[in-house]
Structures are given as C-alpha cells and as structure tokens.
Image: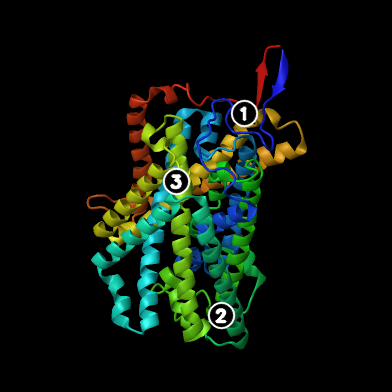
Amino acid sequence: MTQLDVRPRAGDTVSGVVEGVRGKGLGKGSVGLVGSAVIGISTVAPVYCLTSTLGSTAGEVGMQMPAIFLAGFLPMLLVAFAYRELNKAMPDCGTSFTWTVKAFGPRIGWMCGWGLVIATIIVLSNLAGVATSYFWLLAGEITNNASIAALDDDKLVHIVTCLTLIAVATAISYRGMTATKGVQYALVGLQLVVLAIFVAMAFQKASAGTFDTGLDFSWSWMNPFAVESMAAFTAGLSLSIFMYWGWDACLATNEETTGSTKTPGRASLIAMIVLVGSYLATGVAAQMAVGSGGEGLGLANEETSGNVFAALAGPVMGPVLGILLFVAVLASAAASLQTTFIPVARTVLAMSTYEALPPSYAKVHPRFKTPGRATVMAGVATGVFYTVMTLVSENVLTDTIFALGLMICFYYSLTAFACVWYFRGELRRSARDLFFKGVFPVLGGLLLAAVFFKTLYDAWDPSYGSGSTLPGLDVGNVFVIGVGLLALGLVIMFVTERRSPAFFRGQVLTKSTPSLVVED
C-alpha cells in the first residue's frame, strides 16, 4: 500500500479532490482578494455594530470596553485560522456545514449548518430594522421635520418599510456577485471614511474637554481582568463576539473567488484586522470624548445606549457633518443586509446539493449563477421572522440579539473543533500544522464554547437581556429563544432525515481525512 496525497492545490477544482465534495454551478472567478475582504467587512457592518452595541458594552464592563473588544477579537482570530486551513483543503460554499460533516458526520454537520442559517436570519432581521429606523431618522434630519422621523414609531409604516428594504436587498443578491461587489465598494468606503471623521473629531473634542463626562486616556482600559464580575465580562464578551460576526462571508464565496483555496482565507484575516482597528479607535475616542457613564452623553446612558451615534452625531460632529453619520449607519446596515444573504443562501445551496435539504434549493440561476431559490427563501424567512417578532414584542426582538451570541458561539466552535479533528493526522508533521491546524483552532473553539455555556447559564435568569419572560415561565427570554431555536433545528433535522435518509446514512458526504490510502 502507498499513500496518495489528494489534498487540493491552487488551480484544482473542488469536485473530485475531496471525497463526496461537489461543485454547485456558481459563477467562478467573480471576486478577487479586495472584493472578498470588502464583502467580509460589509457583512459585519462595523458602523451598525458600533451604534448598536457600543453603549450596551460600556454598560456591562464600563471603561474596560476597549479591552473587551480585544478579548472578543482573540477567539475570532483563532477560529479564522481554522476556517483558512479547512478552506485550503475544501473550498466549498457550504463552509461550516460541509467541513463539520467531513469531520464529525452528518448530524453534527447538519446542526452546525442550522446554527449558521438561523444566526444569519436573526442578523438580517435586525439589520433591516436598523436600516428602517435610520431611513426615517435621516429623512427627518434632511427635511428638518420631526413628524417624518416619527413615522418610524408607527408599527405598520416601520414593518412595510422594513419589508421593502429586505426585498431590495434580496433582489440585488439574487443578481449575483458582480452586482453585489459594485454596490459594496461604495457603501463600505463611505462608512469607513465617515467613521474615521467621527474618530478624529471625537479625539478633538476630548482634547478640548468639550464635554463634562469626558475622560483622560488610560492604559488600564486595555485590561480585561479589571472587569468587576465574570457575569459582566461574559455579557460584554458576547456582545463583542457579535460585533465581529460575519467575517466568514469571505469563505462562503470561495467557489466564486479567484484562487479559491487561498484568497478567501487571506481576505478574512484582512477584514478582521480592519474591524479590530476600527472598533478600538472608535471605542477609545468615544470614551475619551463623552465617558462610559450613564449620565448625559455617557455611552452607558440607557436612553441612548441602544443607538449611540444618533445621540453623538450632532454634539461630536456638528449639525451638518452629523448627518453624514446617519448616512453611514444607514449605508452600513443596508450594505450588510445585502451581503449577509451570501452565507445563508450558499449554506442552504450546499445543504440541498448534498441532499440534507429539499432538492429545489440546489438550483442555481442559469444567468446570474446564484442560488436564486435559496436567496429568495432567506429573504422571505427574514421578513416573516422580523414581522412576527415585532408584532409579538419589541423586547422579544431585543432578546433575539442576545440569543444570537449563542448561535454564533455554537457553530463557530464546532467549526474550530472540526478543523482539529479533520487534520488530526497532520498535526505532528510540522510546527506550522501543529499550531494552525491544532493549537489555535482548539483554543478558539474552547473559548467560544466557554462563552456559549456561560451565557446559557446566565440567560436562565429572567433579568438577563431585556428582563422580560414568557407568561408562566420563570426563565429568561434569551434562554428560551436560544434553546428553542436549537431544539427547532433538531426537529427539522429528524423530519428531513425521514425524507432524505441517504445523507444521514453518510452515503452522500462522507467523513474522511485529508490523505486517503489506496491500493497499488
């Protein structure tokens, strides 16, 4: 017997290189390194994330907010190495789903794919909601008419506007990567430029002592061990992890990227560096300018913490330039709303291709080379989810954001562990393989798993999240939503298994390792 190395190399096609992995018919060579990195940054939506979580994070950890941003970056970076190594071996648009199936088998892989899909639906719904609010807020600022801005408070107007934005984003994503890429360059460039202006002007206001609540910079802000309690640290870390979610969209386009085995991994690392730099600069500048307290313009003020930039735009940037910050948040949410369709649609496409979902979702549009039906399904699911959650309670919608952290930690940690197990036979081959395929991924997976279980424990408390509970239950809504969504995934998986047994028997996408043994 001899060893045959069948690991893919640059230029190899996906189909046939790794046992069971199939091509999907997507448009090849549509995206390069810069375009892939832009898609990763856009999906994360840095300006949207900052306005949504800057105040909440400060409320949890106080002046240690910059340290929490760094702490959230660490496990994401470690997991990014796992994604890069797995993508080199299997550049498949199913990413986490495909890789965990190859490592652990069909059921764990299916649940990992479910975690990605449901997390994306939650993010899409919240992105659409933020984009809607800023659309009417911007319209009110431009027209100087408070009644127009107040239209966002009308639930019917808000829902109709939100559904319209979802439909537009779905249509753009439906038309393919070329259309998506062109829009993204403009939207991502705009939000990063405006964010840089905000940071510069916040530093200027801080040095001038413009606001009474401002603080002098201290290196102690970078010390995560100074957080008062483990519960506060975990809550802040969960928010920080949410702020980095979405960089893996670079990997979901691997079958459409030039140099599919290497480019997506490099793009994800570039996106991560841009993000952590943006978050640290903004967090430090805002904290120096207005402080992290709960009074006045302080970041933790409960009246403004859910939308920090709406409160700081005028005081920091002035009435004219402040409008640019509203535009940037709208652009950030709109850009991410569009690109976030990429990972969910391609994961559903891959799951259908490998017979883990109904075959109708495996269809690729003959002209646009996109998973058309899967994209439309994601749009419809997002619209229905947001409408139902909004009508039920705004508190429930808020709690879904906290539950999102559970979903993110769930499928990211599984993917990290899948890397270690899949490459277990190569870990002793070199120091590089040991660290990038073993040590770094397992550390990232353990950190995210720890956050998952700690958040689950804390979320049992009814006061966690919005502090609301379902009638008759003395359990926090965040726990109910998080566990409920995972349980729903199990139910759907068992139903699917009865209708499509071949995948779950391991007959379609089989467990394997990078090197196969064949007879002479």
- The residue beneath circle 2 is 289
Q: Residue furthest right?
A: 430
Q: Amino acid at mark 2?
A: Ala
Q: How is the image coloured?
A: rainbow
Horizontal and vertical percent for residue 487? 35, 39
Task: For the residues labelled 2 and 1, say whether their Cβ atoms are less than 8 Å apart.
Answer: no
Above or below 355: residue 181: below
136 to the left or right of 314: left
Residue at 26% over, 67% down: 157
Quadrant, the C terminus = top right
Q: Is residue 467 visible?
A: no
> Which callout, 2 or 3, points to the residue nearer the camera?
3
Query: Closest to the observer: 60 or 383?
Result: 383
Horizontal and vertical percent for residue 473? 26, 49
Q: Is residue 103 visible?
A: yes
* Circle number at residue 17: 1
Q: CA distance from mark 2 to mark 1?
A: 55 Å
